[in-house]
Image (cartoon, rainbow, N blue to C red):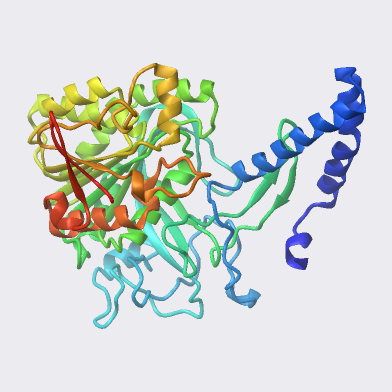
Amino acid sequence: MNEFLSQFNMATVIAAVVVIVIAPWLISRIARQGTATAVTLFGLIAVGVVAAAVVHTSQTDKKPSKEIADDKSAKPGAGSIEPPRKEASAPTDRAPTSRSITERREEAQSQPAENSRSVTPRSAASDNELWDVVPVFYGTDRARKDAEKRIGYSEERGRRLEVGRALVTVPKIHKVPNIERPWVYKLPIIGVTIFSEKEDPAKHFTLRDLKNLSEDEFARLAKIRIDGAKNFVGQALVFVHGFNTTFDYALYRAAQLSYDLKYDSGSFVYSWPSNGSISPRDYTNDRESAEQAEQYLKKYLKLVATRSGAKSLTIIAHSMGNEVLLPVLESLRRDGNFNIKISQLIFAAPDVDRDTFAGIAKQIAGMSDGMTLYAANNDRALMVSESIWRGPRAGSIPPDLPPVVLPGIDTIDVSATETQYFTLGHSGYAEKKELLEDIRSLLSKGYQAPKDRIPTLEPVQTPAGTYWKFP
């Protein structure tokens, strides 16, 4: 408790107390309805403050574990983007990591130690055993917005493709499938921060290094990573994020996917200029930003496909990310010059009109070894989208309709995997162990029928064909 209270800023605490004290009086003056009404309204405001605090909790639904050691000497400077002088030693049985912080080490030590479980070149063991490092290669058409000590990307459109590499730390205390980030509490409207936990790689996902690269250097480093893979040989995994996602959070999500999948080959993410906020205005702006990003995603996929050294490609698109990906796939199919094998296409909760999805799916049929669609009847984010667009989405299952069922696509109803009431049910592909295991099976073994990779699935017959559901 003392540690928790010590991280509050006294000035902001005083400001919060002042707001709490004067709010009933102020509301009563405005409402002209007396103290009782004021207290009632104040109660609603208090609930709103708590809800806003939860929303602002760095996009994670669990506070970091208290299992962290108290040894402060083992913690590097929080929030640093500069490469650390000492890297964590290779993990024992967890997930793929990178111990090569500099490009020279990556090139010189292109194979892991003989008895090491590390899937990337490792440096000498250090005294720090509190986190692992996952390399994530990125492409973006966001505008640059650099901070004092690091490069950065905003929600504005950059109108050009920029590529680079991030080294993301994952704490050893990481619990699948969370993205542990510092807790931040802000008062709504006025935006005053009343509590901000310090960033610590022993507790949180952090960025240890972030560099924009030339396409040649990007391709060279990606090839080193892919050539060093032992389990997912010759593979590239590309993730396209959805609505309400900042650039940094896209990197964290890509790292979490790789880490939890124990994926040891090239991890790539494409980050289009989402606002990273939730409101009707942000939603419509994100959709237009997604549409204009198509030309840049197409260029990025070609770069990864032709110059990374990958022999096969798996693409996961989430939510509004499908709005970017589907027209790009259709364009690549029409061009006829996409000379790489696409192993799997995974459409996770696609926020795309059902008829539009079906039309493009027919055009790209046969473009990959397998296609999987994850849909649900309790995806609250897609329910809101349906109310805006007045029509069902490809990733939703309305009460009066079955899910989208199309030839060549394995549709899986994942509604039963979402049992938490106070969640959106929109990111199950990365937040549910059942779906992570399904994706891992597709990556490691290639295409298999849904029943073969998830024996518990139940078939459901419809006039359009068969889909599968979790019991």
Give the residue at x 80% y 52%: 9
Residue 362 at x, y percent in the picture: 12, 26
- 370 sits left or right of 434 in the view: left
Number of numbered callouts drawn: 0
Give the residue at x 60% y 47%: 57
- 408 sits left or right of 287 in the view: left
Q: Nearer the viewer, residue 205 or 433?
A: 433
Q: Which of 322 and 429 is in front in this view?
A: 429
Q: Please, which residue is most extreme toward the bottom here?
A: 115
Q: Which of 415 and 432 is in front in this view?
A: 415
- 41 sits left or right of 461 in the view: right
Residue 11 at x, y percent in the picture: 85, 47
Q: Nearer the viewer, residue 111 or 189?
A: 189
- The answer to which image quadrant residue 19 occupies is top right
- 394 sits left or right of 190 in the view: left
Residue 12 at x, y percent in the picture: 81, 45
Residue 363 at x, y percent in the picture: 12, 25
Give the residue at x 34% y 43%: 415
Quarter placement of the N terminus: bottom right
Q: Is residue 169 visible?
A: yes
Give the residue at x 35% y 36%: 377
Q: Can residue 165 be seen in this view?
A: no
